[in-house]
Amino acid sequence: MKKGNLITRQPVVVLVGHIDHGKSSILSKIRDFKITEKETGGITQHIGAYEVEEKGKKITFIDTPGHEAFSAMRARGAKVADIAILVVAADEGVQAQTKEAISQILKAEMPMIVAINKIDKSTANPAKVKRELAEQKVLTESLGGKIPSVNVSAVTGEGIEELLDLILLVAEMEELKADITKPAVGVIIESYLDSKRGPTATLLLEQGILKKGDIVGTSLTFGKIKRLENFQGKEILEGRPGMPLIALGFNEVPGIGEKFKTFSTLEEAKSQIELKERRLPTPPTKEPGKKVLNLILKTDVQGSIEPIEKVLQELPQEKIQLGILKIGVGDVGIKDIEFAEAAGAQIIGFRVKAGKQILRLVKERGVRIICFDLIYDLVEDVRNLMKRMVEPQLVREDLGQVKVLVIFLTKKNRQIVGGKITTGEVTKGTLIEVLRPASPAKRGEEDEKIGKGKLINLQKNKKDVDRLVKGDECGILYEGNVRIEKGDTLIIYKEEKRKTGL
């Protein structure tokens, strides 16, 4: 590669992190700051990327709402972005998907910038966030590491300019170059079927110059570019490395994450098409004691299957097992409904349709079907389906302790006892665990748990109350399977069923 052929290209940036930590909000705020209302009005739906200008230099942002989409592109070996922005909410800190995103970034060996969002909240604690990140081997500069970080607010706009400056600084240090004399190559970052314009794809060019009229192909489709647009939908004659480009002219919708390159003739491009028989996956072996969510997956094109399948299999399956029973290309049909009904499966569609007849049949058969246009939305729906299947766990919370001083009344399985609250609080309608001091022969050992019961009523000075605290003396109406004795300690607690994550 000759140095004279190299140009400095604009950086491509992806935002990743936990859901609801503000990735989309930050992207929206950057658009508000850097793209005028007149310009944003022309941005095409499904574009998947846009570019902004900061201090005379351009930055491309891949507009993916979550790390699943980022993962899906990389699943096909595509080099998607140059810099990753790890977004962490200042009030919540590192969460499960934050850790997954960190793993993706480290695996891709990408430069990282930490954006601590929601700094405007009263509960924001960026120092705590940085400590939690350090535990995940993400050491920011303020803690002696090499990873730059910035406090931002997608609400007020605080830190947005600083974030853009950091991106340009990291890009300069990375010395991002491209050879414009090479044949054009790149990756598909978004694609869909436009009812009026036909197969439409957003391309990210890595090398070379792409022009209207060029013949392009992926492993699954090809075509001649009949129209080339910038991210705002304005027609252009050529695109350069780092630019997000909208291309019309493919004979079929290409798959997200597919690599593309240019060819001399349509015949040459067609010869590169890989005709693969799709083997249905083997149904999973059900693990004892574990529930299974069975799915039927229907996609628009063959190229969509691999990245979707990969990100679905990456969902946590310690509690709920995921079974993809059938995969097909094309709209949902009657056979899919029949299969779903027989297998107890749900139908998930990606950029496919279900006609009126199918929807009527779905209602009759009680089969669930839902279709998506974005990988992120599809994965989140499956994740939520799995969460709903998780059995709620019984969680205990200790509230306080009472030292029993006197037994007033004992009758069948009920007692009235008096005591003093030594820690915490006592509330009416809670549960009681009875602890008895160790016998003289076992002096020094812990108190023995001898049984449990309920706190039916609570009194102070012979008057009913709902709550008492440390230092108060109380009367307790107890109901349980053991007899309380003077000198026992009563642990007052409550239990509730809580849904846990995957």
Image: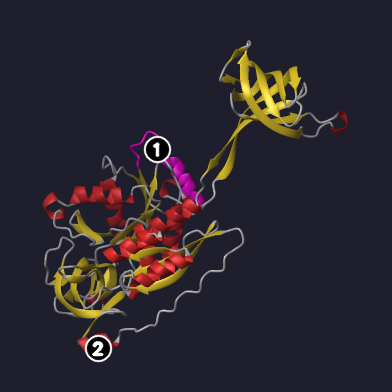
Q: Could you tell me residue 65's position as x and y percent?
A: 33, 55
Q: Quadrant of residue 251?
A: bottom left
Residue holding disc 2: 268
Asked if residue 443 is positioned above or below residue 26 in the image, the reply reads above
Three-letter code for the amino acid on which mark 1 is drawn: Ala
Q: Secondary structure at mark 2?
A: helix
In this view, the residue in front, 393 or 414, is: 414
Residue holding disc 1: 124
Q: Could you tell me residue 74's position as x and y percent?
A: 38, 68
**Crowd band around label 1 with a 10 angstrom C-alpha radius: few (<14), some (14–19), many (20+):** some
Residues at marks 1 and 2, CA–CA distance in whole angstroms = 57 Å
Three-letter code for the amino acid on which mark 2 is drawn: Glu
Give the quarter of the figure containing the N terminus.
Answer: bottom left
Q: Quadrant of residue 310?
A: bottom left
Report the mark closest to the observer, 1 or 2.
2
Total marks drawn? 2
Q: Which residues are magenta?
A: 118-136
Q: Is residue 125 rendered to the left or right of residue 48?
A: right
Residue displayed at 76% across by 27% down: 483
Q: Could you tell me residue 217's position as x and y percent?
A: 26, 80
Mark 1 vs 2: CB contact within 8 A: no
